[in-house]
Image (cartoon, rainbow, N blue to C red):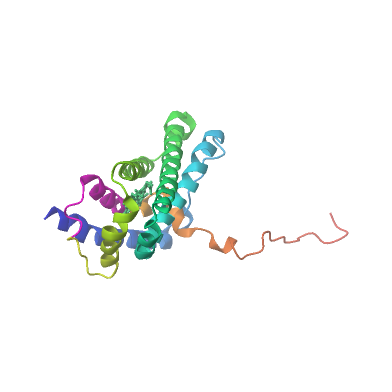
């Protein structure tokens, strides 16, 4: 019964909350779509947290995404042990980088009185969700080998069944608790995302890729100062 609630119903509830709140916030408070940078309050520790966090999480989530889209290719790639070890160890390095960056960001936020003063209850919630989620991911990678293989066999088909609106949880039922918590954690993250400062992910400035690097507009008329 709990499996049905958490893996069959909750994912759709979480995604619905995410979509409805993202659209509502964008329409009603468009200028609140921001990471609310605190760089001007403190920069050094931010660098030590933000850089490993962003590189790590981009690497890890790209890995999740590729395994979700191309599970057969992952199994083919992993069929040579050397390639499996390379894939798993680079994923783990990404996970550790993410965790170190996140811990630095948390220490900075709560250790520095100036940053603490601009910290909202939602910042605490999102940092806690991420800390649990990333720690569980690293724990799974370290203890339940080899994650990329059984992700491709069990989790990718489950996620695809959710996506096709025909959730099939049969394969999930016997999975260890840490994996189940990691899956639920992902949907909790999606549900709280639009309420937090991480909403900036949804408006990544993609136009930076194709727009000119700098737009210069001259207001001055020659000969006048
Ligand atoms: C907010 C979303 C998520 C975050 C932040 C996250 C984070 C992480 C991190 C940091 C790791 C450790 C690095 C690694 O070895 O790959 C990891 C591993 C893993 N995650 Fe996630 N994850 C998320 C969603 C999911 C989802 C939706 C699933 C499956 C349904 C999943 C399944 C796994 C598995 C199986 C591993 C172990 C990979 C391995 O050992 O190679 N994760 N995750």
Query: Can you tell which quarter of the image residue 63 is in?
Result: bottom left
Q: How many marks?
A: 0
- At 44% across and 37% down in the image, what residue appears? 100
User: Which quarter of the rendering shows the C terminus?
Assistant: bottom right
Specify whether 122 is left or right of 216: left
Seen at 39% across and 42% down, the residue is 123
Q: Which is more toward the observer, 74 or 25?
A: 74
- Relative horizontal placement of residue 29, taking residue 218 as reference (left or right): left
Magenta stretch encompasses residue 177:
yes
Going by the picture, which residue comes out furthest to the right? 223
The residue at 17%/52% (across/down) is: 174
Q: Residue at x 30, y 44 (%)?
A: 140
Let me know if residue 59 is in the magenta part.
Answer: no
User: Which residue, as the protein is rendered here, is positioned at the far left?
Assistant: 1
The image shows residue 136, relative to residue 186, as above or below, that is: above
What percent of the width, then of the height, locates residue 206? Answer: 54, 62
Give the prevailing secondary structure in the magenta stretch. Answer: helix
Front-lying residue, 72 or 1: 72
- Residue 24 sits above or below residue 180 on the image: below
Q: Where residue 121 sits in the image (x, y, percent)?
A: 35, 40
Q: Position of residue 209 (x, y in %)?
A: 59, 62
The percent position of residue 222, horizontal first and vertical second, equals 86, 61
Instruction: Specify the segment rendered in magenta.
Output: 171-189
């Amino acid at each position: 019964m709990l499996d049905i609630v958490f893996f069959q119903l909750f994912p759709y509830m979480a995604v619905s909350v995410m979509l409805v709140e993202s659209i509502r916030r964008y329409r009603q408070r468009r200028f609140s779509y921001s990471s609310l940078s605190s760089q001007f309050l403190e920069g050094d520790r931010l660098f030590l947290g933000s850089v490993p966090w962003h590189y790590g999480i981009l690497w890890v989530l790209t890995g999740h995404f590729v395994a979700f889209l191309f599970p057969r290719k992952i199994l083919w790639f992993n069929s040579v042990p050397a390639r499996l070890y390379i894939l798993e160890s680079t994923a783990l390095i990404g996970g550790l980088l993410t965790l170190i960056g996140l811990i630095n960001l948390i220490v900075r936020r709560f250790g520095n009185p100036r940053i603490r003063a601009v910290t909202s209850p939602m910042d605490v919630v999102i940092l806690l969700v991420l800390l649990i989620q990333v720690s569980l991911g690293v724990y799974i990678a370290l203890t339940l080998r080899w994650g990329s293989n059984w992700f491709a066999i069990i989790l990718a088909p489950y996620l695809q069944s959710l996506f096709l609106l025909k959730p099939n949880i049969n394969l999930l039922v016997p999975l260890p608790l840490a994996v189940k918590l990691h899956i639920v954690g992902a949907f909790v993250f999606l549900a709280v995302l639009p309420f937090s400062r991480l909403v900036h992910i949804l408006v990544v400035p993609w136009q930076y890729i194709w727009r000119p690097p700098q737009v210069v507009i001259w207001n001055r008329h020659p000969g006048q100062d």
